[in-house]
Amino acid sequence: MSQAVTVEKLELSRAKQSCLSIPLFTVERGERLQVTGLNGSGKTTLLQLLAGLILPDSGRIDLFGQPINSLSGSERETFRADQLGYIFQQPTLIPYLNPLENILLPCRLSQWRQQRLAERKTTANYEAYQLMAALNMENPELLRQSTGMLSIGQQQRVAIARALIGSPPLILADEAASALDPLARTTLYDMLLKSTREHEQTLICVDHTPYPGFDRCIDMSEINHSQQVARLW
C-alpha cells in the first residue's frame, strides 16, 4: 500500500521555542488514523501543516507524492480544494450562504470534486442531502433556512458534510465532535469511518480520547519529539 502522507525532518518554532519536531510520520493510503494527546501537544498544528495552512521552518511534507510546503499559496489553495476535506473544531460556515450552499461550496470551487460525483452518477445536491441524513439531520427545510438559525451542533454537521462532499482523498478532522453531545459524537465517528472506508479515503482525526474502529491510534507524544523533550524537564 502506498503512502498518502509523509512528513520528514519537520521543525516548527513559535516565539523562538520549538513546538513541533517530527523526524518521520507516515500514513498509508486509505488508512483511518486517530491521533490523541493533551491540549498543547501539537495536534491542531500538525493538521494545519498537512493542509498547507501554515508552513514549517524546515522539513518535507508530501501528500500523495505532492510536496505541499514547496507549492505557492495559490497552488496550495487549489490542492486543498481538490484533495482535502478539513473539519475544524468549531463550525466555520459562511453566514451569508444557507446551509445547503455551504455544503455545496467545495464542489463549486473544485472541478475534481465535480468529476468524482459525475463518475458516481450522482449530483452534488443529492449527495448533500444524503450526507446530512447520515448525520441525523434529515429535514430538508433546515438546509434552506438561514445558517445563523442553526444550533452549533447543527452547524458542525453542515461543516462535516461540506468537508466530505465529492469524496476528497484526504479528510482531516480536528476534534470534529467537540460541539456535539456523546450520542452525536458516536454518530459522527461511525459515519466518518463508514464513509471514508466506502470511498477509499484517508482519514486523520485528532481528539483527546481514542474511539474504537480506527485502523491505528497513536499519541502525539510518539511523533512530536519536542513534546517528549519538554516532558523530561
Image (cartoon, rainbow, N blue to C red):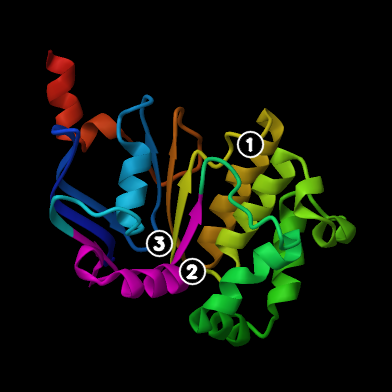
What quarter of the picture does the C terminus occupy?
Answer: top left
| In magenta segment, residue 85 | yes
- Callout 1–callout 3 Cβ contact below 8 Å: no
Disc 1 is placed on an element classified as: helix
Q: Which residue is mark 3?
A: 30
- Amino acid on which the number 2 mark rests in the picture: Pro
- Amino acid on which the number 1 mark rests in the picture: Arg
Q: Which residue is mark 2?
A: 168
- Amino acid on which the number 3 mark rests in the picture: Gly
Evaluate whether residue 128 shows in this view.
Answer: yes
Q: Answer above or below: position of 97 versus 40.
A: below
Q: Classify 10 Å Cα crowding around label 3: few (below 14), some (14-19), many (20 and above).
A: many
Whole-percent x, y for residue 153 in the image: 70, 40
Q: Which residue is mark 1?
A: 185
| In magenta segment, residue 216 | no
Whole-percent x, y for residue 114 in the image: 58, 82
Disc 3 is placed on an element classified as: loop
Exactly how many numbered labels are in the figure? Answer: 3
Give the quadrant of residue 118.
Answer: bottom right
Point out the tag, 3 or 2, that comes first from the N-terminus.
Answer: 3
Q: Answer above or below: position of 76 versus 155.
A: below
Whole-percent x, y for residue 229 in the image: 12, 24
Q: Answer above or below: position of 70 versus 206.
A: below
Q: Classify 10 Å Cα crowding around label 2: few (below 14), some (14-19), many (20 and above).
A: many
* Magenta residues, start to end: 61-87
Q: Nearer the viewer, mark 1 or mark 3?
A: 1
Mark pair 1, 3: CA separation = 22 Å
